[in-house]
Image (cartoon, rainbow, N blue to C red):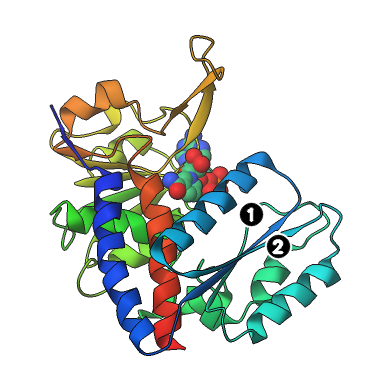
Amino acid sequence: MPNLIQGRIIAEKIYADLRGEIAELKTRGLTPGLAVVLVGDNPASRAYVRSKDKMCRDLGLHSVKLELPADTTQAQLLARVEELNRDPAIHGILVQSPPPKQIDEAAIVRALDPAKDVDGFHPLNVAKLALGDESGFVPCTPLGCQRLLIESGTEISGAHVVVLGRSMIVGKPLALLLMRKGCGGDATVTVVHSRSQRLAEITRSADILIAAMGQPEFVRAEHVRDGAVVIDVGINRVDDPTMERGYRLVGDVAFGEVSPKTSAITPVPGGVGPMTIAMLMSNTVKACRQM
Ligand code: NDP
């Protein structure tokens, strides 16, 4: 049996640490506050926003859930973001993606106060990540992947990490994070994408393989060398008439055939997913501390 890297259990440990930090902030009269803005009624987005709100409340954070109609204009959304930027009780702001098509998402991200950008997508925070400036916010999913590696005792320093995918949400910030100097970094990172040649040859040379492609079960046994550590970021719905809901969730890795070759691997669900929300809470507490 491979060693399973259990995101759910590691996330619980992070919440226990955060509870201590939050209690300490409260003794100083500070309660970290997170505002999550949802435009429209996308059911998946609604579920994400609900779980973020619930987690905030569980931890004793101040939580604001702003639900705006699907026909909200760019100007109306910008006005709400400006209000939250000015609100001293709010330390973190997140605009749930994807917004409806009339919204220019990049312009909304640029309008956020970078000190409250707990998603880490503002250009200033992207620059801070590239510069190795620890005061910036790193996107939650890459931060969660790094934390899984650290908590599972995986040696990152000097390891060859291959990241499959180069999105601004996962692949690119993850590569920057793992090649950063110091603790949790110092890896030799290769990023592959849809135009990469000799993909399997490259992935087979990875000590740590991280799949973030959005391609169900793309990574097969032939892509992985014996003893590698595999982190599966993918969350994909595939039709499955045997399930009551008509689908099942799979990662970007064919778990059944890949896991026996690995020294450690994350499951889907229960791997990276729980870490993303834990890192959002952690970034919100950091934003409050830095305010
Ligand atoms: P994107 O679609 O934005 O990016 C996918 C990346 O994978 C692109 O860089 C693309 O290359 C590359 N890619 C796609 N197909 C191939 C292929 N056949 N060969 C090589 N490279 C390929 O996805 P995201 O980064 O947003 O998300 C990736 C996955 O992670 C999804 O399954 C998503 O649901 C999941 N996810 C999970 C989260 C969690 O909390 N667990 C959070 C965020 C995402 P190119 O750039 O050339 O197009």
The quadrant in which the N terminus is found is top left
Residue 32 appears at what percent x and percent y? Answer: 46, 77
Q: How many marks?
A: 2
Per the image, the residue denoted by label 1 is 97
Per the image, the residue denoted by label 2 is 105
Seen at 80% across and 52% down, the residue is: 101
Residue 162 appears at what percent x and percent y? Answer: 31, 49
Question: Quick one: SS at disc 1?
Answer: loop
Return the residue nearer the eye: 285 or 191: 285
* Residue 35 visible in rendering: yes
Return the residue nearer the eye: 178 or 266: 266
Residue 106 appears at what percent x and percent y? Answer: 68, 66
Seen at 37% across and 38% down, the residue is: 199
Determine whether, in the image, residue 88 is placed left or right of residue 273: right
Q: Are the two marked residues, 1 and 2, in contact with CB atoms closer than 8 angstroms?
A: yes
Residue 148 appears at what percent x and percent y? Answer: 26, 53
Question: Quick one: SS at disc 2?
Answer: helix
Give the crowd class for mark 1: few <14, some 14-19, many >=20 residues within 10 Å. Answer: few
Q: Nearer the viewer, mark 1 or mark 2?
A: 1
Residue 233's place in the image compared with 107, above or below, is: above
Seen at 49% across and 9% down, the residue is: 242
Q: Quadrant of residue 217?
A: top left
Ligand 1 closer than 8 Å to label 2 CB: no
